[in-house]
């Protein structure tokens, strides 16, 4: 079954994915530069970093809205639906495979098929990233772009400070996700085969 050639990544998804990945790289580079900028030392010139960060954030937002709509109205949505019954057990089985089974060449517990593009861990992480963390980073990003929209005072703390904190923490978690995501994408048939799939559409 897993040897079949499957068309899993339609063109709209590939275009969204690579725009999203590219914007992420720009946002991480400029975001880090802004975060650690000192009076003399900046990785990217401060005004450029602000400008590129804002532009990349807006492109990311547009592509995110596109993803949500396309994922809602195409058959790709079925891969994001979590069946709660027995989900934790399936997660554990996949986790065990990643920390043990894969190293002794056990067969994959949830091989890719036409009905199952993601294993349980992939499904959970993609749902959390796309439907929880992306909205948080986008909304807090706009909160920082338009400071007047923030609540002035939350129990004695400036609202904008909390928005900033949430933005930075979510950005950090998403950056870690991206590194882990890329690492797990090397677990395909060959190290590069999953990356190739995201360009050709074929698994
Ligand atoms: C340079 C950075 C990145 C690379 C090289 C990369 C690579 C890949 C590859 C090879 C796949 C196909 C394998 C699979 O389905 O797991 C994939 C899928 C996916 N990636 Fe990435 N990725 C990157 C960044 C990101 C970022 C930043 C996000 C989200 C914030 C993301 C979200 C996703 C999602 C949701 C899928 C599944 C899409 C679907 O089939 O419905 N990726 N990625």
Image (tube, rainbow, N blue to C red):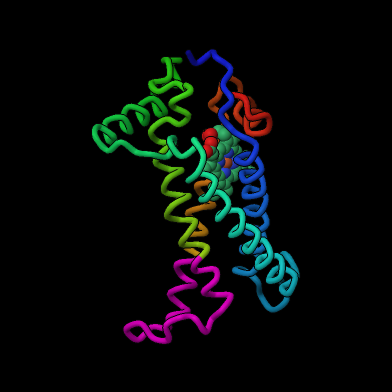
Q: Position of residue 133 (x, y in %)?
A: 45, 56
Q: Residue furthest front?
A: 73
Q: Is residue 26 above or below residue 82?
A: below
Residue 80 position within the rendered picture, expressed as x and y whole percent measured from the top left: 42, 39
Q: Is residue 91 above or below residue 173?
A: above
Q: Does the magenta run of residues contain 157?
A: yes
Q: Can residue 175 be spotted in the picture? A: yes
Determine the image quadrant of residue 32: bottom right
Q: Main secondary structure of the magenta part?
A: helix
* Magenta span contains residue 154: yes
Q: Image quadrant for the C terminus?
A: top right
- Residue 27 % position (x, y): 63, 59
> Is residue 179 in sight in this rendering?
no
* Residue at 49% from the left image edge and 72% from the top image edge: 164
Q: Residue at x 54, y 52 (%)?
A: 175
Ligand 1 lies in quarter: top right
Residue at 39% in and 86% down: 153
Apparent side of residue 89 relative to residue 109 in the rendered image (left or right) = left
Residue 155 sits above or below residue 191 on the image:
below
Q: In the drawing, does residue 121 fall left or right of residue 146?
A: left
The stretch of residues the image draws in magenta is: 139-167
Residue 90, how many percent across, how many down? 31, 30
- In the image, residue 50 above or below residue 71: below
């Amino acid at each position: 079954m897993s040897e079949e050639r499957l068309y899993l990544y339609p063109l709209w998804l590939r275009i969204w994915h690579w725009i999203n990945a590219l914007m992420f790289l720009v946002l991480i580079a400029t975001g880090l530069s802004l975060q650690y900028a000192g009076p003399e030392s900046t990785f990217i010139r401060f005004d450029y970093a602000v400008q590129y960060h804002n532009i990349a954030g807006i492109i990311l937002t547009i592509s995110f809205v596109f993803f949500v709509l396309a994922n809602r109205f195409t058959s790709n949505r079925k891969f994001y639906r979590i069946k709660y019954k027995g989900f934790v057990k399936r997660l554990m089985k996949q986790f065990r495979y990643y920390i043990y089974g894969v190293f002794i060449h056990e067969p994959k517990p949830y091989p890719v098929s036409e009905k199952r593009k993601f294993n349980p861990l992939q499904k959970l992480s993609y749902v959390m990233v796309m439907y929880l963390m992306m909205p948080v980073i986008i909304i807090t990003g706009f909160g920082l772009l338009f400071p007047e929209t923030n609540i002035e005072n939350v129990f004695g703390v400036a609202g904008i400070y909390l928005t900033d904190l949430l933005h930075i923490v979510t950005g950090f978690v998403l950056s870690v996700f991206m590194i882990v995501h890329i690492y797990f994408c090397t677990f395909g048939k060959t190290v590069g085969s999953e990356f190739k799939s995201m360009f050709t559409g074929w698994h």
